[in-house]
Amino acid sequence: MKTPIRTLITLIACAPLWAFAGPVDINTADAETISTELNGVGKAKAEAIVEYRKKYGPFKSADDLSLVKGIGDRTVELNRANILVSPAKKK
């Protein structure tokens, strides 16, 4: 009986350490949302993503994030399931 209780206590104690990211559209989200929702992306990198998007236009795929200085392939892979890419709006 002690083992299940210890396991439960350990899981509860570690719960704050788990970061659950949510889906984020990298073509529409602001820097605050990007930094909150993508693991390994802080405020500075999120701002770089927004600036890149303003300068070069919308991202076509999640892989395009690696074109942003400071965002590597590993960061893209860690977040792939949570990266949404809305289609570019036609003028």
Image (spheres, rainbow, N blue to C red):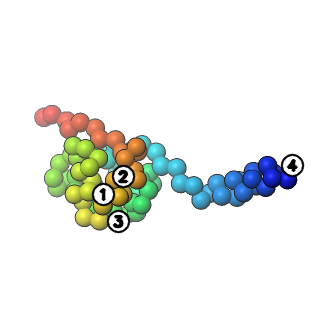
Query: For the point 16% across and 55% down, which residue is it?
Result: 55
The span from disc 3 to disc 2 (Cα, nearest Å) is 19 Å
Q: Contact, CB < 8 Å: mark 3 with mark 1?
A: no
Q: How crowded is mark 3: few (under 14 residues within 10 Å), some or many (20 or more)?
A: few
Q: What element carries label 3?
A: helix
Mark 3 / mark 4, whichever is N-terminal: 4
Check the picture and name the quadrant holding the C terminus: top left
As drawn, the label of residue 77 is 2
Q: Residue 10 vs residue 53: left or right?
A: right
Q: Contact, CB < 8 Å: mark 1 with mark 2?
A: yes
Mark 4 / mark 2, whichever is N-terminal: 4
As drawn, the label of residue 81 is none
**Which residue in the rendered view is the most extreme toward the right?**
1
As drawn, the label of residue 1 is 4
- Locate residue 50, reporting x and y percent: 28, 55
Residue 80 appears in the figure: yes
Q: Name the residue under label 3.
A: 44
Q: Residue 63 vs residue 32: left or right?
A: left
Question: Can you tell which quarter of the image residue 15 is in?
Answer: bottom right
Query: For the point 23% across and 51% down, which residue is it?
Result: 64
Residue 33 appears in the figure: no
Mark 3 / mark 1, whichever is N-terminal: 3
